[in-house]
Image: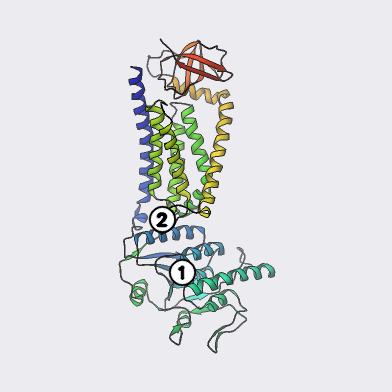
Amino acid sequence: MAKLRAVSFAAIATFNVLMRICLLLAISLALGVSPAAARDEVAKGNIVVVPVQGEISQPTFVFLRRIQKKAETAGAAALILDMNTFGGRLDSAEAITNLLNRSTIPTYTFINTNAGSAGALIALATGKIYMAPVSAIGAAAPVLSTGEDLSATARDKTISYWSALIRGSATRNGHNPDVGEAFMDKEKEVKVGDRVVHPKGSLLTLNAQEATTRTDGKPLLAEGIADSITDLVQKAGLKGEIVTIKPAGFERLALWITALAPVLLLVAMVAAYLEFKIPGVGVFGLIAAVCFGLFFLGHYFAGLAGWEVVALFVLGLVFVLAEIFLLAHSTILFGLIGAFLMLASLLWAMIDRYPGETFVPTGAMLRVPVVNLLIAMIAAVIASIVLDRFLPRTNVYRRFVLSAVNPSGPSLGALPHEFATSLHVSAGAKGRALTTLRPSGKAQFGDCVVDVVTEGDFIPAETSVAVVSADGMRVVVKAAAS
């Protein structure tokens, strides 16, 4: 009978945990298939159009990374940046430039009015540039976030670095590197053959007509003038359905979530520990589920993880729960496999892998994810040790425990109001389990409720127990004959 009750409780507990996860994933998927996300569907041969508008910032990079990976995975025909920006952060522009330069599908920029400063640098990282009839590109001089000029030394260092980056990016994509360099350095002269296109003394800015000027059949910068994206597609000879994808509004939050990944993992791990430490409460399990859900959802919108990592995490959790509830610790194999799968899914979610790269990540790809996971795990272990030592002495913990073990019916009778964090009991002393011991829980000895732990066995509530050993706050028990 005790075994049947144990299996029944295990099935209910497992179902309860999985239902929480499914509910959280349903909410996440509901956010993921919102009207904005529905437009994220990309099929093979599609022409993917993404807006690059307003200030260039880190969320811009997060958005473009997600869509570029989606487009490459789907086998899209081309990626077109619909650009209208006066610029923004140079570090974000550098990240986007590196992103575009590694693209495996053709890339285009449609300058819809403006491609100023950082926008000009990004445009140079695409294969072809088209401009609206009234539009401009250039003026990419680095300035402080306040709009003020850099000091002479900082300016020289910044221009030296970015000039090299621009020249490399422009050359790779078939653009005139001198034009790109003149966008940033006013001391750069631009010549086409013997003709001076731009003299020293000012930053280069080109309108559509100037940028499309051809010498010996080669444009100065832009391939042509287009009235719209549709016109660009026709003039570029692209074939396929045009799919426009706009930011989902989650990129900024996703940026914060990925930055705070160690904190989310720490809170989730500690909350999961407390859920097993204080059976029946439920609130800590909900906190753990929310933190894990936010972790995976944030990395999904950041373009780092797909839903397959969530499936791997859930599979690992099923193995762990099976080990705890169903197998009654008869073997540790399932628990070890489950823990490995859960940790692997957390690590996998943080790896920035691009389509076509090898499945086994490189050291550079693993560096940040491994550091984040190690920080979270070490901090969680320390927090768990501290909580295990001091939490049972607090009034809040005692209230939680007494409310968790207090039955709704008459089966257990009235519980004592005194709660002991340790008890001077000797080996052989008998009591009864007030909660399911899995392997820790609460047992009653005389008039006191005591924190106990088994030797690894699963012991249902209302089972007679006997003390194996007692060392301070640690009371080890085993099932005893009634």
Query: Which element is circle 1 on?
Result: strand
**What colour scheme was applied to this rendering of the protein?**
rainbow
Residue 224 falls in which quadrant of the image?
bottom left
Mark 1 to mark 2 CA distance (whole Å): 18 Å
- Considering depth in this image, is 144 or 224 the residue closer to the camera? 224
Residue linked to disc 2: 248
Task: Answer few, some or many: residues within 10 Å of disc 1's Cα (few below 14, many 20 plus, some between 14 and 19).
Answer: many
Relative placement, left or right, of 179 versus 232 is right
Provide residue 474's location: percent of width, then percent of height: 55, 20
One can see residue 417 in this view: no
Q: Quadrant of the N terminus?
A: top left
Residue linked to disc 1: 84
- Considering depth in this image, is 54 or 1 the residue closer to the camera? 1
Q: Are marks 1 and 2 in contact (CB under 8 Å)?
A: no
Q: Is residue 38 above or below residue 152?
A: above
Name the amino acid type tagged 2.
Answer: Ala
Q: How many marks?
A: 2
Q: Is residue 372 above or below residue 337?
A: below
Relative placement, left or right, of 243 versus 136 is left
Query: Which element is circle 2 on?
Result: loop
Q: Could you tell me which residue is drawn at 33 percent across and 58 percent down?
A: 41
* 1 or 2: tag closer to the N-terminus: 1
Task: Answer few, some or many: residues within 10 Å of disc 2's Cα (few below 14, many 20 plus, some between 14 and 19).
Answer: some
Name the amino acid type tagged 1.
Answer: Asn
The numbered mark at residue 440 is: none
Q: Could you tell me which residue is drawn at 57 percent across and 30 percent down?
A: 385
Q: Could you tell me which residue is drawn at 43 percent across and 38 percent down?
A: 289
Q: Quadrant of the C terminus?
A: top left
Provide residue 260's location: percent of width, then percent of height: 53, 47
Relative placement, left or right, of 267 versus 82 is right
